[in-house]
Amino acid sequence: MVSILVSTLLLDHFRTHGLDFRSISKHNFYTICRHLSVISSQITSLYLSEKDDSPGQIDRFYSHGFTLRQFTHLQSLSLYHLHSQDTMNKILLDLPYLSSITHLTFEECCFTYDETDALTFVIIIWSLPKLTHCYINIQFKPQIYFPIPKVISSTIEHLSNSDIEPQFSQMTRLLENTPNLRHLSIDFHFNFSDEYQSSTMTSVNTFEYIVFLDRISYFSEFSQMHAKFTSIESRST
């Protein structure tokens, strides 16, 4: 009876505030996990972190027998400071089951992926049927370009990508495979001398994008990309 009452109270709280495990103590983490199986299917947002004050948290989450696919009504998933490739692979296996997810965040994550693994990562994300907001702050080792997905996402509207930029020449294909994109934020860091460094920020009505350029010769390509953005915006109005 007490267990049912606790589960009910937890569910009422997490429905409003989401299930946020960031900076939580191990004791509280284990306490919540004891009741999580009862309420997991009704949680709509989940935050997990591997930061210094909560190391190994995501591994403990899985070691308790939980998988992300149990959170069948999850709409928002945020993962912080994930550095384990094995754990990331488990997450990628679960993501296709999260058919209701609209917001996905990877913040300050880092792991070893080759180009094939990275492409699989992106394809899985672009295949999520309701995803609208995607924030990717990941370092792949060795450093590689952000692979352009071979599938089309008709739902992604907001995309933020740092640390793994796509090749500038592939930006048009990225837009073609994300046709409903309305906000794009990408850092381009080309390792050239400071004398060529410059930056620009521009917007086209509801379609906004932010690009940081470190080489002035890329402005001609940037102008072509700007024309592509304008064309997309014209077709959407």
Image (cartoon, grey):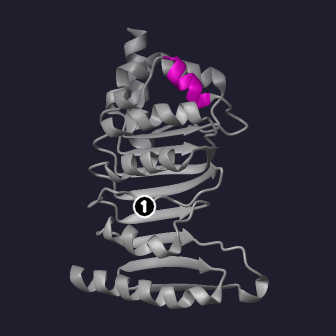
Which x, y percent locates residue 5? 39, 17
Residue 184 magenta-highlighted: no
Q: Is residue 99 above or below residue 70?
A: below
User: Which region shows up in magenta?
Assistant: 57-64
**Residue at x-position 30% and y-position 85%:** 231
Which x, y percent locates residue 66? 44, 22
Q: Residue furthest right?
A: 194
Task: Give 203 or 92, whichever is nearer the viewer.
Answer: 92
Determine whether, in the image, residue 107 is placed left or right of residue 160: right
Determine whether, in the image, residue 132 is placed left or right of residue 202: left
Which x, y percent locates residue 73? 30, 37
Q: Is residue 170 above or below residue 25?
A: below
Task: Give 106 or 227, whichever is nearer the viewer.
Answer: 227
* Prevailing secondary structure class for the magenta stretch in the rendered image: helix
Q: In the image, what residue type sits under mark 1?
A: Ile
The number of callouts visible is 1
Q: Is residue 55 above or below residue 235?
A: above
Q: Would residue 205 be seen by someone viewing this image from the given angle?
A: no
The residue carrying mark 1 is 148
**Residue at x-position 49% and y-position 34%:** 89
Q: Is residue 20 above or below residue 146?
A: above
